[in-house]
Image (spheres, rainbow, N blue to C red):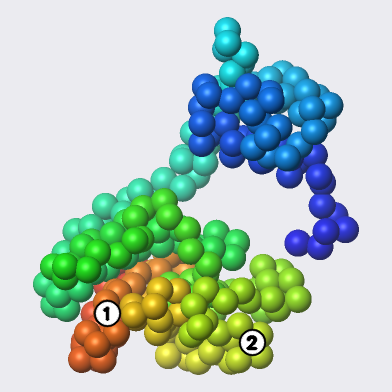
Amino acid sequence: MDRKYWVPALERADLILGAVSRKPGECKMTELCEETGINKSSMFSLLRTMEALNWLKKDEKESYTLGAGVAYLNLAFNESHRQNYNLVEHFLKASAQSVKVTGETFQLSVLDRSEIIYLAKQEGPSLVKLESNPGMRFPAHATAMGKMLLALLPQEELEKRYPGGILSPVTPQTVTDWGAFTEKLAGIRSSGYAVDQEEVIQGICCAAAPVYDASGNAVAAVSTSMLRHAFEDKRETAMEEVVHLGRTLSRI
């Protein structure tokens, strides 16, 4: 986003909510100042306002917890994203067969601005367990699922999410050149699947495919992840299975 339109007070409120959510009932105003870097004068005004809006609640020890106003917003968010929960349920059922076919782990995620959020994971039998638990976020441009979903965005929307075409490196294999990146996205749109070869985790490769809703919009992506040597051996099978899983979930 262009910083010209940035609202610092909202950014500070977001920092406060994040700090309180990480340590509910543990932070007083002084601790919140230390945690966020906000000075005491600004913090006092922000906390008073957030209490009045019921975003925060102060207990008898003058420590803060999230208020009922945040709980309401969370309820509204969950209701608006109810389809994701149905999708998770169907993913867990359908991906069990995919794991049997490939012997590898499968994952489901959605795109949130320039990140992906993992919704579910079906573990394969490999002794190597992936750090991709539900709720975790990863930079979309470095992941197969993220690239899959970014490839299906209008160019204008893509550029909004990456002002100046800046792509941060995650591993030495991460594509950071904007021209090369958009060229890869064009190839992904054409093929219908995406690949990540050690771009987000060294030694791990992934293949991903989209999941469409009834209107034909890409609402999520599925992927299978494995060690590099396993991907070299199973690449074709992995591609076929992840595309099949994406189509299966798209029909629900």
Seen from this angle, which residue lies furthest right? 4
Q: Give the numbered dot on residue 177.
A: 2
Q: Is residue 98 visible?
A: no
**Mark 1: which secondary structure?**
strand
Dot 2 alpha-carbon crowd within 10 angstroms: few under 14, some 14 to 19, many 20 or more: few
The residues tagged by marks 2 and 1 sit, at their Cα atoms, a distance apart of: 25 Å
Dot 1 alpha-carbon crowd within 10 angstroms: few under 14, some 14 to 19, many 20 or more: some
User: Please, is residue 223 above or below residue 14 in the view?
Assistant: below
The image quadrant where one finds the N terminus is bottom right
* For residue 232, side relative to residue 109 (left or right): left
Name the residue: 69% across, 76% down: 166
Quarter where residue 239 is shown: bottom left
What residue did someone put label 1 on? Answer: 227
**Mark 2: which secondary structure?**
loop
Seen from this angle, which residue lies furthest top? 60
Q: Which x, y percent locates residue 46?
A: 76, 28
The image quadrant where one finds the C terminus is bottom left
Quarter where residue 222 is shown: bottom left
User: Please, is residue 4 above or below residue 245 in the view?
Assistant: above
Q: Which x, y percent locates residue 142?
A: 50, 75
Name the residue: 46% across, 79% down: 199
Q: Which x, y percent locates residue 217?
A: 49, 68
Name the residue: 85% across, 55% down: 5
Front residue of 195 and 249? 195
Q: Which x, y percent locates residue 25?
A: 52, 22
Q: Is residue 133 visible?
A: yes
Q: Amino acid at mark 2?
A: Asp
Of pointers 2 and 1, the one earlier in the residue sequence: 2
Q: Amino acid at mark 1?
A: Leu
Name the residue: 84% across, 26% down: 41
